[in-house]
Amino acid sequence: MALTTTLDMLRKAQEHHYAVGAFNVENMEMAQAIIGAAEELRAPVILQTTPSTVKYAGTALYQANVAALAREASVPVAMHLDHGSSYELCVSALRAGYTSIMIDGSKLPLDENIALTRLVSEMCAVVGVPVEGEIGRVGGKEDDLEDEGGYTIPEEAVRFEKESGLFSMAVGVGTAHGFYKETPVLNKELITTLRGMLTAPMVLHGASGLSDEDVRDCIARGICKVNFATELRAAYTKAVREVLADPSVIDPKAYGKAGRAAVKELVKSRMLVCGCDGRA
């Protein structure tokens, strides 16, 4: 089927108290793995790319790759720009055919974040594409950006939702991008509080390395989109390295196949934790 937006996906997840897994994709094999996992589990799925990923090969190439795979799939597939770093990048992704856009103005003062998110939301609304905004930074490292993070202030989140025109909201509750060096301290009560004050679907970034129990608890409290990136890259790279330990291997398909299989199994396990299996 054709690529779909995240509108129905996240509304259904919010209504029925599960989350849709959103998985960062770096190449064809990872895209095949993610959609293959979704097909096997009959799960809706979001594939997403960061600014550094699209800088590597361009929004058009990644969109075309995922769109081609989605056309052969029998489950809903959305293509999302993760951590859109500028209005111009959001325009590029939208023109390429992305069906969901994130503009990350979380480092800006609240008024500027609202203005930027509103600008992108107004543009995307013309073609019916939903926008994810972020308030309360998520710590750790994503691409080349490193941040100490911060918790979302509920009153600011209410204003952000009201004035920015966003569809979904990434909230800061103690998670971080990358692998955790120490056990994260999640403010789960903050999720409960935000859920009671907001109507927008809430997004959890930095889920790689969280325990299954923590992810399930965050979902039970109101999270309905969960992002996974770092652990997918690690699984793919580990599998490739194992194959390339044999110096006689020179066929890219041999190690690509190994990376694809590793990512597929990991994605399936994360979909089961999110509870989106059987929801397509």
Image: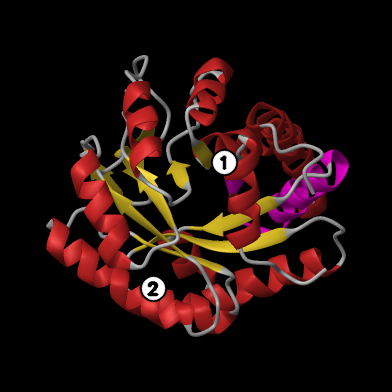
Along the line of sight, the residue nearer the viewer: 26 or 190: 190
Question: Which kind of residue does numbered mark 2 sit on?
Answer: Ser
**Residue 114 appears in view:** yes
Question: At which x and y percent is residue 219?
Answer: 53, 30
Q: Secondary structure at mark 2?
A: helix
Query: From the viewer's perspective, is the residue at label 2 or at label 1 nearer?
Result: 2
Q: Is residue 6 above or below residue 165?
A: above
- Mark 2 / mark 1, whichever is N-terminal: 2
Q: For the residue carrying disc 2, how many other residues have a C-alpha within 10 Å: few (<14), some (14-19), or many (20+)?
A: many
**Residue bearing the label numbered 2:** 121
Is residue 25 located in the magenta-colored stretch of the structure? yes
**Residue bearing the label numbered 1:** 233
Extent of the magenta region: 21-41
Q: For the residue carrying disc 1, how many other residues have a C-alpha within 10 Å: few (<14), some (14-19), or many (20+)?
A: some
Question: Which kind of residue does numbered mark 1 sit on?
Answer: Arg
Image point (32%, 52%), residue name: 134
Along the line of sight, the residue nearer the viewer: 271 or 239: 271
Specify the color scheme: secondary structure
Image point (85%, 48%), residue name: 39
Q: Is residue 13 left or right of residue 115?
A: right
**Residue 25 appears in view:** no
